[in-house]
Amino acid sequence: MKDLSIFRKVAILTAVVGLVMWSCNDKEKDDDKNGKGEIGLLAPNNNATFVLATTPSMEFSWSKVEGVAEYTIRFAPSEAAVANSEVKANVGDKLSYTLTAAQAETWMKDHTDVEPGKSGDIYWTVTCADPSVKTQTRKIVVTRFPAATGNEFLNVTSTGNITFAATPAGTQTVTIEANVAWTIAVQSTGGWLTAAPTSGNGNGSITLTAQTNTEEQARSATVTINGPVAGLTRTISVTQAGKGGDPTSLLGTWYVKKIERIMQFEGVTFTSEEMNPTSFTLLNDGTFTGRICYMFTSVEYDGSNDMTWEYEGGLFTFNDRGEVGTYRVVATASELVFEVGAAGEFGYGKATYTKTPNAVSFPTITPYTGSANMFHGEWICTKIEFAIEFDNVGVRETWVETRSYNKADEVYYLTVNANGTYTMVSIGEAPNSGPWTFNSATGIMSVAGNDWTVDAASNATTLIFGAFWENEEYDEIEFQRLTFTKK
């Protein structure tokens, strides 16, 4: 009986161990099935179609992986390139991303060979900073907007920044004037802003509804109205105030550190950065002196002396002699940041100020003295820098602005031929052509009627021109530097 008892104990122990092992193995299988250690792509389904002319947006979602705090969604025209693609959006800890038709059209135009109105296979994935976490790849079929015929139009009554109070929840109406069908896409974290209807044809209106904001900080959203053809997209930036904040943290003198804007020129979107010695002082009585940066607001002074400001619910509103601006604001003891619009979208602006003056240096250029053969070929302008050093009441001050363009937009390009001729093309202007010369002793290249100094940083893929002009009438020294990349 004793031996039998021992046998029974061993049998029971073996059964328990087996059960535990079965449970662990089964759990591992379930973990693999559920994507633990792997970012599982949930939606859309593989081979889903995204027709930009009829669908305002597409929602992408994926599974959460334990220990991963930040995700990045990426897109590419090939499966091999998608994992490292720079066409991406960093979404933090969110598990979804809304791609609007307008964003998709811009990306397709800039990064694929798909023609307007045609379809192409696009791959997407989600990655994180941990290389040990696996990911999946899915394909969507995207159909671009067809090319415009020139007769279509789509206009909206509000193209700037619409502002809602934090509470109560409210509505605002946007009127649409069009001779085409249109769709609406709204991007707002947590879905706090909605639009109705989401589509229409011809003239109409949409109602924007904002939920109550229970957070301290202001929040932003983007409303995109898409027409059925390329270039017929309108974007509205919407801001809602937060619950509150202490306005005394804004008092004092603030100096411009950097002003950033996402702008458009003849349908081309570009980023503009500006540095200058401008400053303003916010006074405790609700008035200010100096100049506050205007972001997407035309300046037309009405002749009054009204220069006032107020801060409520994370929103900063100022009146500068009849011109009114409203920005989201984040302030610390040493830095003040104004924002308007939605980050990454046309109409976005960000102005950063500090308590100490910003030292703005005048650009310099070192002459290139190498072979002129390097210039031969087609070059596309990707960056233009402007600088003005001017005498402001006996004090020399410098203002610098940089504009960065997408290479694929070909805003401004130059062809340098080996036979000593060139062709220069700029959007909105007739082509300019003629002879060019280069002095290797001075680094001066004469082209398009101007003498440009070729920068020593120029190489087989980058070409940099710089030029100075002295304006005696206004006591100014002007500088322009153009950066080209090989087409």
Image (spheres, rainbow, N blue to C red):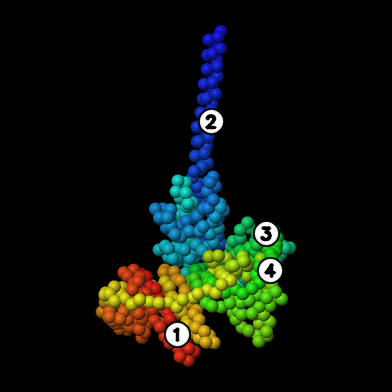
Q: Amino acid at mark 4?
A: Pro
Estimate the x, y position of residue 132 in percent, counting from the top left: 45, 46
Q: Amino acid at mark 2?
A: Ser
Please tell me whether mark 2 or mark 3 is closer to you in this view: 3
Residue annotated with mark 3 = 215
In which quadrant is the N terminus drawn?
top right
Residue annotated with mark 1 = 477
How many numbered marks does the figure carry? 4
What separation in Å lies between label 4 and label 3 (alpha carbons)? 17 Å
Instruction: Specify the farthest residue to the right.
Output: 168
What separation in Å lies between label 3 and label 1 (alpha carbons)? 48 Å
**Mark closest to the chain's N terminus, 4 or 3:** 3
User: Which residue is more in the foreground, 227 or 103?
Assistant: 103
Please tell me whether mark 2 or mark 1 is closer to you in this view: 1
What separation in Å lies between label 2 and label 3 (alpha carbons)? 45 Å
Residue at disc 3, secondary structure: loop
Residue annotated with mark 2 = 23
Please tell me whether mark 4 or mark 3 is closer to you in this view: 4
What separation in Å lies between label 2 and label 1 (alpha carbons)? 78 Å
Estimate the x, y position of residue 279 in percent, counting from the top left: 58, 77
Residue annotated with mark 4 = 247
Q: Residue at x 50, y 32 (%)?
A: 25
Q: Amino acid at mark 1?
A: Ile
**Mark closest to the chain's N terminus, 3 or 1:** 3
